[in-house]
Image (tube, rainbow, N blue to C red):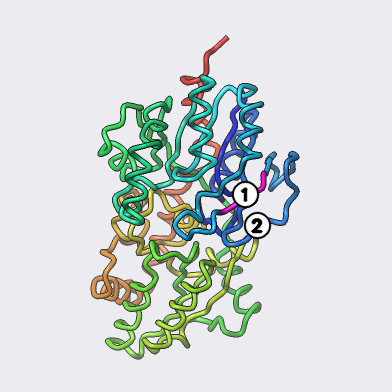
Amino acid sequence: MKVLHLIPSISARRGGPSEAVLAMVAALREQGVQAAIVSTNDDGPGVLDLPLQRWIDVRGVPVLLFPRWSPPLHGLREFALSVPLLRWLHRHLRDWDLLHVHALFSFPSTAGMALARRQRVPYLVRSIGQLNAWSLRQSAWRKWLFLALVERRNLEGAAALQATSALEAADLAALGLRAPVWAIPLGVALPPLNCAAARHALECLDSRFRPGEPRLLFLGRLHPKKQLEVLLEALALLSRRRPAQPWQLLIAGQGEPHYERELRVLAERLGIQHRLLWLGQVSGAPKQELLQGCDWFLLPSAAENFAIAAAEALAAGTPVVLSPQVGLAEAVQAAGAGVVCEANPADLAQCLERILAADGQQTWQGARARRLAESSFAWPAVAERLIEAYRTLVPQP
């Protein structure tokens, strides 16, 4: 079976969706699917320093990148036009049994779905949470207009829609689309665990990691949707209530430079800057040390269809604090693998106060976190479910 994955960007700056597609294709290939990725060289405000218009290996996955051009108008900057990509798809899309599209409201995915429909190539769509109520309220008139004129027809023409959580499935159902919705989560790798060694490695790496102090971690793209402002305000409130309570917040990720500056200014104004460590983009072994070397992973997001970083924390044996708007929240609450808390400063401060006061709570919840990742989100099992779904869409010989 030959499955082509199409996504506007594989850049780490774009967060979980880009990370997930690389891991997904690697897992599919391990089970014998001829899977590959076509994308652009988008890297947020810049472009990736990778070869274009020839197949390359990215983390063991065949990837074909094309140059993208972003319109100068701010409202259209994310559309990522790429005429060479469209030409390649026009010539080669019929060479594949199935097109798996990741993302909406972007030229590569929008044009790819329209072309697949025209060439009668079945396609599956993962909307990466872009159809939830919060996302549709951002640049609302543009999205609803584009949805009405173009994207709804693309969605209606899909062989199926992939929802990565029950929360996302409900968002898709609310739109009344004809295409069937399949609930297939994303997956995570299951690393070997050595949390004590990870904590020690962090302390050796940087003297700012204070031994014995509770470590809270935010890891992911720095974006208003993640509501880091709410987290900072909650921590400031906690510090006023319990000034003697030790804690340290590690912030790992990148975003738009102006937004990062706003967050730093807010932390200074709230008087908690000295308790924050801004680590920038972290990947590979250092990322795993962070995930295993911290006590709690925090994500008070306004909207997350799944939250791959939270799933990675579960796999690292780190319990999570999530808002109800995070797709994983229901599973985490049912498994006792963390805490689900409303994303407002007062409730979040109270939640953090409780978990920091309950010494040792993170140990048993961390064990449940790992078990949840093993039972529900291991990539081999998720890949098997995807392959089973693919077979229902691909004509069998």
Amino acid type at mark 2: Val
Q: Does residue 262 appear to the left or right of 286 in the view shown?
A: left
Rendering coords of residue 185 (x, y %): 43, 41
Q: Which of label 1 and label 2 is nearer to you?
A: 1
Q: Is residue 69 magenta?
A: yes
Residue 44, image quadrant: bottom right
Mark 1 secondary-structure assignment: loop
Q: Does residue 21 appear to the left or right of 300 in the view shown?
A: right
Between 295 and 256, the one lying in front of the other is 256
Instruction: Give the Cα separation between the discs numbered 1 and 2.
Output: 8 Å
Q: Residues within 10 Å of mark 1 (few under 14, many from 20)?
A: many
Q: Earlier in the sequence, mark 1 or mark 2?
A: 2
Q: Which residues are magenta?
A: 66-70
Amino acid type at mark 1: Arg
Rendering coords of residue 116 (x, y %): 52, 26
Label 2, on which residue?
Answer: 47
Q: Which mark is residue 68?
A: 1
Residue ID at (48%, 57%): 309
Q: Residues within 10 Å of mark 2 (few under 14, many from 20)?
A: some
Q: Is residue 210 magenta?
A: no
State which quarter of the image contains the C terminus. Answer: top right
Q: Are marks 1 and 2 in contact (CB under 8 Å)?
A: yes
The answer to whether 277 is drawn above or below residue 54 in the figure is below
Q: Main secondary structure of the magenta part?
A: loop
Residue 25 seen in render: yes
Between 5 and 73, the one lying in front of the other is 73
Mark 2 secondary-structure assignment: strand
Residue 60, image quadrant: top right
Residue at far top of view: 397
